[in-house]
Amino acid sequence: MTKTDLIEKVSLKTTDLTKKQTEIVVNMLFDSIKEALATGDKIEIRGFGSFRIRNRRNREGRNPKTGESVSVPGKRVPFFKAGKELKELVDGKMEV
Amino acid sequence: MKKADIANELYEKIGISKKEALDIVEMVLDTMKESLKNGETVKIAGFGNFVVRSKHERKGRNPKTGEEIGISPRRVVTFRPSHIFKQYVNGQNENAG
């Protein structure tokens, strides 16, 4: 399912918003998660999961072609942890 | 930051009521959950992919007692952030890096 499919499905479920408005809401939802993480905040959505930043340390890597050692700088990576309800749903232990 | 904060932001930015904003966020999340429940990948351009992966049965250990236990096969959700998202949290814009 792509974002377009998601917008399509959601707009079929609601009569309150136009498809265009639904599209704006969907985009803003994901944008606000990105913004929160970029500012060091974390997001917790009950029943779905949480998004937070994980820090990767500097490390020594290797160029696989030449075998040459290179230093890989540390970085921040977005991390998602599925919530209990989502975990159980996906594992077939629960109905929506 | 919680779901209500997100709904609040939606309310401020596009002027739909808080109730409407909260309802629609709920609907979006439920739709994603249904898809994942069916084992389907959810791909959000510019954000990332939510993928269902099947894990084989394996042996684990109770870290407290050291006792060996079987971990049953299961399906789990993993999130793979897009390049754009990864660059964004590292303070680079979409064209950099």
Image (spheres, coloured by chain):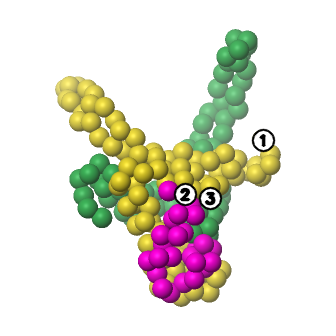
Chain colours: A green, B yellow
Give B66 or B31, whichever is nearer the viewer.
B31
The mark found on residue B26 in the picture is none
Q: CA distance from mark 1 to mark 2?
A: 26 Å
Tag 1 residue: B97
Q: Are marks 2 and 3 on the same chain?
A: yes
- Subunit of mark 3? A
A7 sits left or right of A66 in the view: left
Q: Are marks 1 and 3 in contact (CB under 8 Å)?
A: no
Residue visible at 42% across and 51% down in the picture: B40
> Any magenta on residue A87?
no
Q: Does residue A74 appear in this view?
A: yes
Tag 3 residue: A34
- Subunit of mark 1? B
The part of the image, by quadrant, that contains residue B45 is bottom right
Q: Are marks 1 and 2 in contact (CB under 8 Å)?
A: no
How crowded pointer 2 is (Cα within 10 Å; few <14, some 14-19, many 20+) is rated as few
Give the mark count: 3
How crowded pointer 3 is (Cα within 10 Å; few <14, some 14-19, many 20+) is rated as many
Q: CA distance from mark 2 to mark 3?
A: 18 Å
**Location of residue A66 in the rendering, given as x and y in whole percent from the top left corner:** 73, 12
- Image quarter in which the C terminus of chain A is found: bottom left
> Any magenta on residue A18?
yes
Q: CA distance from mark 1 to mark 3?
A: 18 Å
Depicted B17 relative to depicted A35: above or below? below
Q: Amino acid at mark 3?
A: Lys
Give B2 or B44, whichever is nearer the viewer.
B44
Point out the stretch of residues depicted in magenta. A1-25
Residue visible at 65% across and 80% down in the picture: B13
Secondary structure type for disc 1: loop
Tag 2 residue: A2
